[in-house]
Image (cartoon, rainbow, N blue to C red):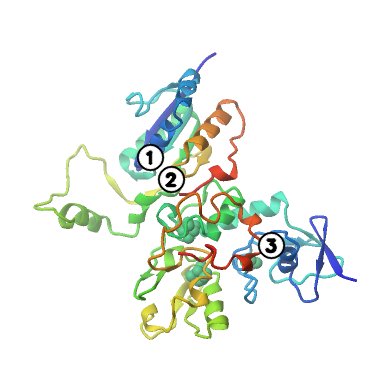
Amino acid sequence: MTKTFRLDGREIPFKEGQTIIEAAAAAGVYIPHLCHHPEFKPHGSCKLCTVNIGGRLGAACTNHAAEGMAVESETEALNADRRALTQMLFVEGNHFCPSCEKSGNCQLQAVAYHLGMMTPHFPHFYPARDIDASHPDVLLERNRCILCELCVRASRDADGKNVFGIGGRGIRARLIVNSASGRLAETNMSVTDRAAEVCPTGAIIRKRHGFTVPIGQRLYDHHDIATQLPLPARRGEGRGEG
Amino acid sequence: MTKLKVATCSLAGCFGCHMSLLDIDEKLFDLVQAVEFDRSPITDIKHCGPCDIGIVEGGVCNAENVHVLKEFRRNCRILVAIGACAITGGIPAMRNNVDLWDCFQEVYHYGIGLENGQIPNDPELPLPFDKVHPINEVVRIDYFLPGCPPPADAIWKFLTDLAAGREPKLDYDMLHYD
Ligand code: SF4
Ligand code: SF4
Ligand code: FES
């Protein structure tokens, strides 16, 4: 007999070892997330996927599904928290969507649309962050980085290259490049790497691909990110397109 | 029927949001039936009196912007931030990590095709700020309508909701940050 748990009152089947978010996605149920990617090890850092697991808050991408557990996700309170977290991500970086190549295909923006974010609300930090344009094919735009470590995981676990890392702590945390000069041109990163397309935001951009899809035809122009499951099937269809 | 009094202004914006408002095309006839414009680039009235709705485009980049914004807040029952610049600082805020003096040098001295450029220095000119800020960092804002610019239909929906005393609600298609 298949095991199940309840998610917002709905029976969700799961296989042993599956996380809540994986089981939900397999059943076609969207739980907002940014640092989770089905192909990579959980990171549990953005906290957007926070759900109520039997009265306790936990990340749906790091907690395993268990027989009979009762999970709440689509509550007003949880979505308000998710919206606040998303607003913080916006003010912590420099997100000027009108001038961003990723706009329309960006998961941060799409999650904000999904949550009905009308304003970033909090005072903007306008942090000073470096751009690295040294690589011939890949642009590193740290102003848009949300430190989800997907590029770190992809480069290490899929590409076997270990090009990226996170340096510094707290508000000084930043994406670093593992080369003597710290510049991307001096790594063996290639534009065909998984790390070049996995970024949910416009922080890692394939050069000369910007603005190729007209406004109105981009991934999230008309379709809520919640309807775009499952994510792996969408590879190369705009997600990660520069 | 008493008409709603509406004031609009553009601070550190490009007037794109105002253009998008005009883009409601023939609905403009319905609009002028229901609305009387106070201070606005449409009327050229210079100061704002008591209004039902104030619509502010653009962020705050200089001292004059702050005066205008405060005048709007004092006079408008409902104040709406319209567009990316009013809500996030927008494109003008991309200068926030460039030294202001360097900006001036670039624009007035080193820009392509410039000869003997001079940095304007007239006492009439408002004092520029070293950073551009969204307007909700200066006054309380009641509603936010994002977009660069928001589509005409979104503006129409938003205003008609407000005028009818409803909480404005946008369909997914109308919510854009770009
Ligand atoms: S990365 Fe996404 S949220 Fe940030 S500026 Fe680009 S489109 Fe906007
Ligand atoms: S560059 Fe992109 S993938 Fe890498 S940590 Fe930043 S947001 Fe995540
Ligand atoms: S998606 Fe679970 S913490 Fe980021």
The reply to whether the C-beta atoms of the residues labelled 2 and 1 are less than 8 Å apart is: yes
Q: Which residue is mark 2?
A: B148
Visible residue check, residue A170: no
User: Identity of the amino acid at label 2?
Assistant: Cys
| Chain letter of the residue beneath label 1 in the structure image | B
| Chain letter of the residue beneath label 3 in the structure image | A
Q: Which mark, by number, is residue B16?
A: 1
Q: CA distance from mark 2 to mark 3?
A: 31 Å
Q: From the Cβ of disc 1, is ligand 1 less than 8 Å away?
A: no
Provide residue A81's location: percent of width, then percent of height.
64, 55
Q: Secondary structure at mark 3?
A: strand
The reply to whether the C-beta atoms of the residues labelled 1 and 3 are less than 8 Å apart is: no
Q: CA distance from mark 1 to mark 3?
A: 38 Å
Q: Residue at x 80, y 73 (%)?
A: A15
In this rendering, the answer to whether A18 lies above or below B171 is below
Q: Nearer the viewer, residue B7 or A170?
A: B7
User: Identity of the amino acid at label 1?
Assistant: Gly
Q: From the Cβ of disc 3, is ligand 3 less than 8 Å away?
A: yes
Marks 1, 3 in one chain: no
Q: Secondary structure at mark 1?
A: helix
